[in-house]
Image (spheres, coloured by chain):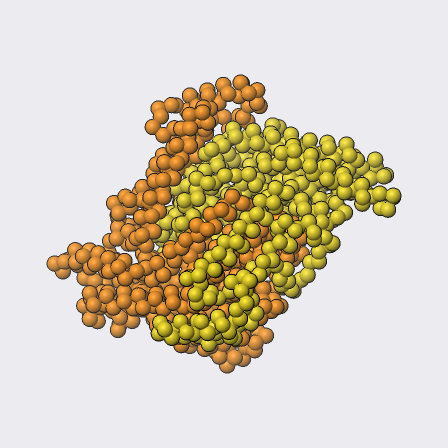
Chain colours: A yellow, B orange
Amino acid sequence: MVGSVETVSDVVNGIVKEYMAENVEPLPEELNPKKIKVPLHLKNEDGADNGENSTLVSGKREIVLGRNVHTSCLEVTEPDADDEVTGDREACMASILARYRKSLIERTRHHLGYPYNLDFDYGALAQLQHFSINNLGDPFIESNYGVHSRQFEVGVLDWFARLWELERNEYWGYITNCGTEGNLHGILVGREVFPDGILYASKESHYSVFKAARMYRMDCVMVNTLVSGEIDCTDFRAKLLQNKDKPAIINVNIGTTVKGAVDDLDLVIKILEDTGFNHDRFYIHCDGALFGLMMPFVKRAPKVSFKKPIGSVSVSGHKFVGCPMPCGVQITRLDHINALSRNVEYLASRDATIMGSRNGHAPIFLWYTLNRKGYRGFQKEVQKCLRNAHYLKDCLRSEGISAMLNELSSTVVFERPQDEEFVRRWQLACQGNIAHAVVMPNITIEKLDDFVKELTAKRSTWFKDGKAQAPCIADEIGAENCACARHN
Amino acid sequence: MVGSVETVSDVVNGIVKEYMAENVEPLPEELNPKKIKVPLHLKNEDGADNGENSTLVSGKREIVLGRNVHTSCLEVTEPDADDEVTGDREACMASILARYRKSLIERTRHHLGYPYNLDFDYGALAQLQHFSINNLGDPFIESNYGVHSRQFEVGVLDWFARLWELERNEYWGYITNCGTEGNLHGILVGREVFPDGILYASKESHYSVFKAARMYRMDCVMVNTLVSGEIDCTDFRAKLLQNKDKPAIINVNIGTTVKGAVDDLDLVIKILEDTGFNHDRFYIHCDGALFGLMMPFVKRAPKVSFKKPIGSVSVSGHKFVGCPMPCGVQITRLDHINALSRNVEYLASRDATIMGSRNGHAPIFLWYTLNRKGYRGFQKEVQKCLRNAHYLKDCLRSEGISAMLNELSSTVVFERPQDEEFVRRWQLACQGNIAHAVVMPNITIEKLDDFVKELTAKRSTWFKDGKAQAPCIADEIGAENCACARHN
């Protein structure tokens, strides 16, 4: 197909001829390829944004509301009548996939900004890709659909319930599509427990928390944060006192998205108690997207535990564990879940999940990794990540670059590189004047050295001849971490 | 591990010894395996509900609220200290996976009840399972995360927008995690367009529609259905007239879940207009989970098209297309989407999706199949499914079994088998006195013959000697389709 000079009408004629030969009904008129606009042949536009050419793109990107900009698109085109004979189409698709795979290798190699462990090997599970595995509805109640992986899912859930200290017969949970679904679920459970509750979340909470408030039509109070990114408990106390008449639903961050800051769960609970919120008047959801799985292995870290008065904990599966697609784990108390349950006979299953149909492969990926690594394996990896994160922060500081690393975190926050091309090359996540790198198990010392070397070299061109000065980011990361001219 | 008589304390001792040898920090106390309850060795309980033993299970299952019944669970256990040396753990896991794969083959073979096309071959895509592909946020706006598949996603979206007649520069959409996410999104867009709108949905709508109403705190009016399962437009008109002061958000079923009934979109629109709802006072979401992709290829079927005043259409990707995991496509009008959009700098992406982090493999599966089959390929498959569905209905009727098949549908509704074991063996979806089989591309005439033969044989034992009589299901499927003693 690619490289062919066949026109659309050739294709159409081919189709029409074949129809006539087979005596099949004609395609409905609206699908007549003659009427279909722009049925281009397959274009190979995968270079610009994900391939070897990505470093060629530079300049600030614009975020445009209300436009669906087709920056790159691999079009779906109608097969030629003789495609099955010539094999051209298969060949063309194979070449697109091979090129795409190459770009994925390159992009996976140069990646620092997102909290995804890109180092995994699920070769042993490739045999399962031939099956349409779907865990419909509740993990603990069979549906009639037999091609599922509930037995793996429940094993994984048990492991996490144990990690967060909730008895096997007292928890409920499921494997979600991502961290966002965990937050959506936890906050929904909170709202069902306290229909007139107010949602409190620090302003550095993940945006899905505020999305939930909007979706669920909940009153939401945004709480200030400290420079570290932690919730400002003084502000939290003040805001609770202003709304004493309504129950409180609180999102506690076990690692914020940008700075990896861990909210002080014990202090949050103490303030709730001090301000007169009894345990039957608040619900705490812990958003542990990344750190929910790291914290248990960090010495002296505050503990996330259902022995404390919390309602739910969520964690992502594609972050510290590593998984081909996003997924997550949501654990809550069994007695909360009835508030949300509905009995749906169609599936022979009550459905307290958000999604209903659920990816049955994700539980198997998680089960596989948890079984191979165990608590001990995760502990080793967490310790390595924290060590390497310290190494990165120290390297940056010794090069005179502003940088911050929270005590319990492997997220190194630093001065935003001036060059969008560099940001994109290393896939850094940025916000205002700061960027971050998240040191995950696949990030080696060698990769960090490469990164710092490259950043230092680039930086010398951005700030040479006093053309510009490194910005002050003391407001974002604290004066003691800022290396600008004033704070140096 | 399996078959070993090692005790938990042996395992613990092994771990402790290795710690001392490696001089690593000890595990936090709460993860000390001594304190972990029931750390059984891997149990192989995968037979009962998904394997070769499934036919041994019988009797009515109970749906229990408020319990997380561990009917089957493959536990995650802590590795032994010497697992890497002996290879025991790898061997044990491999054997579990091999057995699981065998059960999946069997369960895939005996499947009639869910609208999933289980016939696909994505071997060419196995190479991509090594990558953590995530389409963060909006498909049309790049995020900084480079390991994505937006170019495939946009190609697939273009194809669907074309199918439903919305110009390339006028639509917005994304690939969802399942049909439920499409409904959640479509109804949310409707609510954002009309914040005080009332949601109308026929009582045979998918349960996710009512879940959405509850999640979003929307007023919801349930509309009656005809025997066919279609929305009862007389009742719809009456209910609109009772609520003329508020905008209407309507869920239109393009194929209901149980009976495959297609609501009459044109009539719904006409009634809205007749009752004084101008186009700026209603929003229609079309739930086309299965039939959204079949209808365009059915002669004389009413057309789903954005040339009509509809707001969004969703379809599942794992149903007619076939996909290893649930996914779906959601298409809406670009000018609606700003109501929902938020600019989230963290991702360098506005986020009008529900999930934020999105499975990047699903778009590639869809792209691959659409490119191979094309409109023409789907047309052939749709025609085959409709023919085979007629064949099944005719076989059932000629055996004296009550059965109904809606004109535009491949869902055959029939008398619920009396034996739960049989229901489970064929994975039939049931509701009250009826069951259904959905004839998908992987269902052959041979399989249907086997099914009817087996059903007939079983049935003769259920109803022999006048012990019991086949129930009357005229209320569910119409007197003309009922073969009970009275209606025969």
Q: Residue at x 12, y 58 (%)?
A: B465
- In the image, B165 versus A272, the foreground residue is B165
Q: Position of residue B439 (x, y in %)?
A: 33, 62
Q: Quadrant of residue A276?
A: top right
Residue A239 visible, this orientation: no
Toward the bottom, the furthest residue is: B274
Vertical comparison of B464 with A291: above or below: below
- In the image, A453 versus B422, the foreground residue is A453
Vertical comparison of A254 with A338: above or below: above
A2 left or right of A485? Answer: left
Q: Position of residue B319 (x, y in %)?
A: 42, 59
Q: Position of residue B176 (x, y in %)?
A: 52, 57
A365 left or right of A455? Answer: left
Vertical comparison of A197 with B10: above or below: below
Disc tally is 0
Quadrant of the image containing the N terminus of chain B? top left
Q: Quadrant of residue B203?
A: bottom left
- In the image, A237 versus A328, the foreground residue is A328
Q: Position of residue A415 (x, y in %)?
A: 75, 42
Q: Residue at x 54, y 40 (%)?
A: A322
Q: Residue at x 38, y 39 (%)?
A: B97
Q: Residue at x 56, y 51 (%)?
A: A99
Residue B112 visible, this orientation: yes
Quadrant of the image containing the C terminus of chain B? bottom left
